[in-house]
Amino acid sequence: MRVNDLVLAVLVLAGACVLAGAAWTLPPIPGQHYGAAVFPLAIAGGLFLCGVVLGLGALRGARVPFVTRTWAAEPGAAWRVAATLSAIIFYMLAAPSLGFIATSALVLLGLFLLLGVRLPVAAAAAGIASLCVFYAFAHLLRVPLPHGLVEGWL
Amino acid sequence: MGAVEAGIAMVMRFDVILTILAAAAFGIVVGAIPGLTATMAIALLVPITFFMEPIPAVGAMIACSAMAIFAGDIPSTLMRMPGTPASAAYTDECYAMTRKGEAEVALGANVLFSALGGLFGTAVLIVAAPLLAEVALGFSSFEYFWLALLGLSCAIFIGTGAPLKGLLSLLLGLFFATIGLDNPAGIPRFTFGNAELLSGVDFIPAMIGLFAVSEVLRAMASGAPDWEMRQTAMRNPLKGWGRMFVTYWPQQLRGNITGTAIGILPGAGADIAAWVSYAMSRKFSKTPEKFGTGHVEGIIESTSSNNAALAGAWVPALVFGIPGDSITAIVIGVLYLKGLNPGPTLFLNNPQAIYAVFTIFILANLAMIPLGLAALKAGTALLRVPRKLMMPIILVFCIVGAYAVNNSVYGVVLMLGFGVLGFLMEEHGVPIAPCVLGIVLGKLLEEAFVTSMIKADGQLLAFFERPMAAGLGVLTLLVLCLPLLGRLRRALRSA
Amino acid sequence: MKRLLVAAAGLALSVCLSFAPAIAAYPERPITLIVPWGAGGGTDSVARMIASLLERDLGQPVAVVNRTGGQGVVGHQAIADATPDGYTIGLLTVEIAMMHWQGLTKLDPASYTPLALVNEDPAGLQVRADAPYKTAKDVIDDVTKSPGKYKASGTAQGGIWHLALAGMLTSLKVQPTAVPWVPSNGAAPGLQDLVAGGVQIVTCSLPEARALIEAGRVKSLAVMATERSKLMPDVPTLKEATGSDWTIGAWRGVAGPKGLPKEVTDRLIPALKKAYDSKAYQDFLSSRGFGGRWAEGAAFGAFMTEADASLGKVMKEVGLAK
């Protein structure tokens, strides 16, 4: 999925305007010339210039369709990308109650199967990898990974 | 017995050497895990050092941090996932080498030149610590402003693709750096009243998202087929190293010097050193077009640089108790705890301890070569795992790493957002390296600018009033303007 | 037979699991100690020392977790939001009595179950060693003569050391704006800027300035406390130097989320007391130059409430509160 430079330029210009508008409302440091707003405003200015140059270049250059379907044209690609993103979101929502090991194993199992790994291999790899990661991080490195279904048994 | 021999004798004990080796192995593991930084490795060591003798305690910290900075290159090369921020500058270059089947060559270069860089930094520490610390102490926000700007100008040289899109990426990074409460004015910016956003955008989850998650997404989109390229094994490292050393010794030397110099400055550390060195390497290279395609030249210069910076950071720490980076900030605390109070008096009253520290530095960097080679062999074995299995596991590593930075789900949210952003940016030919650079340097630049303006009551000319600031300022303006002038001249000639 | 064994084992296990919490005394699993500041700072090292001592006493690992950012807001929020089961506690710092006045958060000392105050470091007034001042009074006189000329640093805008300076000036009838504040990322960069000539005054604690004082680059002219510090007994108190009654310091104490059960506090407070009195902790304090201060349970709570009121009053006076 790729938008052309003209659309990109419009997006950048819009972003620059929103940023400048938001920066304008920031209060100054009492008694100082330069405060919290200076940097965001400078960045907004830079983005605006970038957008203008990008847009002009696109107008002068060859006509490109607004949206090109690059990878999304491949069968199943969009679905697999969406599934990967959902897997991350699922982890965030489920890990606090299910615990790290169960959630991670589910995420791995789902993605393995999506990529066409055979079920026994996928199940074994998902379980072993989750246990190893948990052991390394939670026990050796003392990262407080969420506890849940399985962790209490270890 | 002189102080030098006494210092060496303090280190050459079975238990001390054993502690150093154990800490080194620990450093490699932590450094190789994305999201866990060298700083974190040291912080995890602190409670253990409470119950150690002074010399092994300090030795453990030195060995651990040196290994962690090197080990950050391992996942960066194999999975495009920088293990520590100091590796981010040349992650793409290393990963491109892996894609060409040269993972072992890239990692071999990382091992050797990290060790050499560390040794160079150590040599400087031994010879000139008190003198250089004096210079570093003279840096005020005026000088740091120019330095940060000079760092940003690196973005011109590191981006592949169109310069305009590189600038766009840099500005995006600078914008992310403005989010949160940690700005000179102490005012929450763009936080929408959210407590987590007050802490701003931590660049480690951002980096994991931009580099690693975007790569996983791309692999998932294509169904993660295995690469057709086979990895070439490095049979005799000594032979390959010899050739690299002969060909690229000037790059290596330049990286060493740049890294040490940046490391000595209290406001900048190994990560900035690596960026500057990579940009310099490309700028002065005879074959700049090869950069970004898996070319070892830039890797050599920047990997030397970040390890040299590590030793450099000890200069102000030992002489004035001022941390050169976040690692030495922790080390200073431990030095006090062990009665080795940093300061010029340490050099006078307790020289054998100083020589012991130097000895440990040398040993740690020498030990890096065998340990690093072992880690390299273990790491490249991972490349034989089918990518269909590897990619989901990398994703779980990304999640855990982003979580571990601050032990909060917020890191995972950031990682996800930046993963999508990185995926879209690369889709549109916008390079991601300048964005990371912007996030790294944005805070330093803004802080230096605003605090300088408070000190100078808003007089912009103050940036040129101090001699060192003026020198740096002129240099920065030259670097920024020369490409523009060149273009102008060409335009005039063609007109 | 086999099936019976499995069933029996399953039953035994489930019985164990269901009764375990009732039989086992707190703590039966690892405890997390949240630190709102980064690894390597003073707060972090206090936390790691306390954690390693608690660990020995409680027989369970006590993991230090740094939750940084937002000038401490994020970490303090995480402590307050934790489940009050005693398995997540944290180290509160003086900022908890400041940031709600600045409108950064709704959290205040009443959002926690106070356990124990373990340390306090008063602010010091530092200048360059080669500055022409002999006493704190000289500095104040010079500042009064040319307001706005001298700049001070030591922490972020609105941070504890900024307040130390502003409060000191107000107590001496000088406008706090007479010395503009240059925000810095902690005491170390502020001190470096002092030596580099970027600022003229740094207010921060003595242990923070110690290395540069011992290196002969910086001198401390006063300490904003009722008593002189053990670390540098030659430095007079602010009262001795200028007659001002102003005192301020950064303190740290262990607390849990609101509503910790009594069996948890009954176990933790004595354990903390033991840790505080241990030789290891006292040696740690003296080697780092940190000041010890002990208050437990309700007394720590009262201490925080009092600090909250007095800091809030001054913040309003000097215009740092919203």
Image: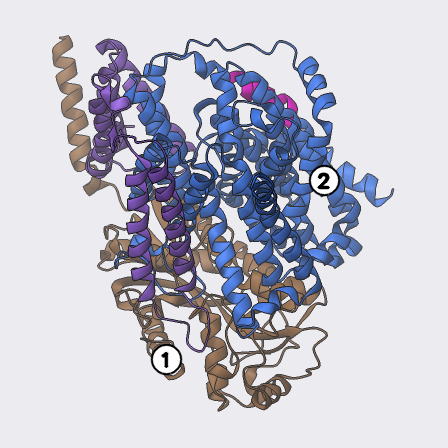
Chain colours: A purple, B blue, C brown
Q: Nearer the viewer, residue B463 or B26?
A: B463
Task: Establish if C242 lies above or below C268.
Answer: below
Using a 10 Å C-alpha cutoff, classify the residue at mark 1 as few (fewer than 14 neighbours), some (14 to 19) or many (20 or more): some
The magenta span reads B368-379
Task: Establish if C86 lies above or below B388.
Answer: below
Task: Estimate the x, y position of residue B22 in percent, counting from the top left.
Answer: 58, 30
Q: Amino acid at mark 1?
A: Ser
Q: Residue at x 37, y 63 (%)?
A: C116
Q: Nearer the viewer, residue C52 or B215?
A: B215
Asked if residue C216 lies left or right of residue B435, the reply is right
The residue tagged 1 is: C310
For marks 1 and 2, give the CA distance: 50 Å
For disc 2, the chain is B
Tell me if residue C66 is in the magenta stretch: no
Magenta stretch, main secondary structure class? helix
Q: Amino acid at mark 2?
A: Thr
Task: Estimate the x, y position of residue C140 in percent, counting from the top left.
Answer: 58, 86
Secondary structure at badge 2 equals helix
Secondary structure at badge 1 equals helix
Q: Residue at x 36, y 15 (%)?
A: B387
The residue tagged 2 is: B122
Asked if residue B91 lies left or right of residue B210, the reply is right
For disc 1, the chain is C
Tell me, yes or no, if residue B313 can be seen here.
Answer: no
Q: Residue furthest front?
A: B495
Residue C189: quarter of image: bottom right
Q: Nearer the viewer, mark 1 or mark 2?
A: 2
Task: Estimate the x, y position of residue B447 in percent, counting from the top left.
Answer: 50, 60
Task: Estimate the x, y position of residue B60 in percent, counting from the top left.
Answer: 60, 38
Residue B284: quarter of image: top right
Rendered-image quadrant of the N terminus of chain C: top left
Tell me if residue B370 is in the magenta stretch: yes
